[in-house]
Image (cartoon, rainbow, N blue to C red):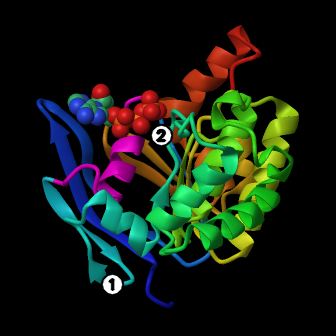
């Protein structure tokens, strides 16, 4: 098999007494969609933060196309094409939708003219279905549209690996279907996707492979059907989730 786009080797990171990520090794292959699931506090977001240079690992390595990028800064990660969305969506509220995306194109996409960046932004807004709101202020967008904007901003950085941190939280069923379609279309362009999700419908709907974390470590990894039937996964994550759903059917 060709070399992985991203290889994590024995990554660990503690905060005070909490071992947030504990000896995690993981490969992402080109064009793959990998789901990352696990209970709250399992270490999923911290793992992404270690990949993008927001946090430095205590131990282990991050290899991007075989190159050691372990101690890179977040802007270097973005320029290399290791991009992420954030759990809490934070557009620049005083800029238009177009200029939010254009800022991404200038910052991470290597565009040096604002006119070219705006042109690229308009293409991406059309791709995510936001072209009709291009000249609105970002602050006026609804939650689903802010999530689309967040995706367009990330795409403006020409990602090779895109890490999506709960981009579907707070969306209704129809909005989730649209978002899933968008994620598949991004993947078809050759972008490798790591998707952190609590909604099993999303994880099972798009992931070719699922990785399960608990207490900082990987407890299971494999194709979606194998993983959801794994007893450790049911005990650590799905069991409690499904029990919760029985009590509250609106819960994911
Ligand atoms: N900057 C930090 N300072 C201190 N503790 C942190 C920090 N970031 C994360 N942690 C702790 O590390 C552990 C893993 O947190 P993390 O946010 O990575 O989990 P998660 O799997 O993404 O959870 P969720 O599904 O709730 O987003 C938690 O116990 C959390 O409180």
Q: CA distance from mark 2 to mark 1?
A: 32 Å
Ligand 1 is in which quadrant of the figure? top left
Q: In the image shown, does 48 or 108 lie closer to the viewer?
A: 108
Give the label, 2 or 1, closer to the camera.
Answer: 1
Q: Is residue 32 something that shows in the picture?
A: no
Query: Is the residue under label 1 in contact with that under label 2 (CB below 8 Å)?
Result: no
N-terminal of the pair, mark 2 or mark 1, is: 1
Q: Is residue 206 something that shows in the picture?
A: yes
Q: Residue 25 at x, y = what percent? A: 33, 63
Question: Is residue 118 positioned above or below 224 on the image?
Answer: below
Q: Residue 108 at x, y = what percent? A: 46, 66
Q: Pointer 2: residues within 10 angstroms few (<14), some, or many (20+)? A: some
Q: Which residues are magenta?
A: 40-57
| 50 drawn magenta | yes
What numbered label is drawn on residue 232? 2
Q: Secondary structure at mark 1?
A: loop
Q: Which residue is at a point 75% across and 45% down the rendered structure image?
A: 135
Residue that carries the numbered disc 1 in the rendered image? 66
Specify whether 116 is left or right of 22.
right
Q: Which residue is at a point 81% across and 55% down the rendered structure image?
A: 181
Q: In the image shown, does 48 or 74 lie closer to the viewer?
A: 74
Q: Which residue is at a point 57% across and 67% down the rendered structure image?
A: 114
Question: Is residue 114 positioned above or below 241 on the image?
Answer: below
Asked which quadrant contains residue 59, the reply is bottom left
Q: In the image shown, does 85 or 1 lie closer to the viewer?
A: 85
């Amino acid at each position: 098999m060709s070399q992985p786009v991203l290889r994590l080797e024995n990554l660990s990171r503690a905060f005070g007494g909490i071992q947030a990520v504990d000896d995690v090794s993981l490969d992402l292959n080109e064009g793959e969609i990998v789901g990352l699931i696990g209970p709250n506090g399992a270490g999923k977001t911290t793992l992404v933060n270690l990949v993008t240079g927001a946090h430095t690992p205590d131990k282990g390595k991050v290899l991007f196309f075989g190159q050691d990028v372990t101690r890179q800064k977040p802007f270097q990660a973005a320029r290399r094409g290791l991009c992420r969305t954030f759990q809490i969506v934070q557009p620049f509220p005083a800029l238009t939708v177009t200029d939010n995306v254009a800022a991404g194109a200038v910052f991470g996409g290597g565009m040096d003219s604002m006119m070219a960046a705006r042109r690229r932004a308009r293409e991406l807004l059309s791709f995510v279905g936001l072209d009709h709101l291009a000249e609105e202020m970002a602050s006026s967008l609804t939650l689903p549209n802010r999530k689309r904007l967040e995706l367009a901003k990330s795409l403006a950085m020409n990602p090779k690996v895109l890490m999506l941190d709960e981009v579907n939280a707070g969306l209704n069923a129809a909005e989730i279907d649209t978002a899933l379609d968008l994620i598949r279309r991004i993947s078809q362009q050759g972008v490798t996707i790591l998707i952190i999700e609590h909604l099993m419908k999303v994880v099972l709907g798009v992931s070719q492979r699922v990785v399960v974390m608990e207490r900082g470590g990987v407890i299971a990894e494999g194709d979606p059907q194998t993983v959801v039937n794994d007893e450790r996964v049911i005990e650590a994550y799905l069991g409690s989730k499904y029990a919760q759903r029985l009590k509250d059917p609106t819960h994911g």
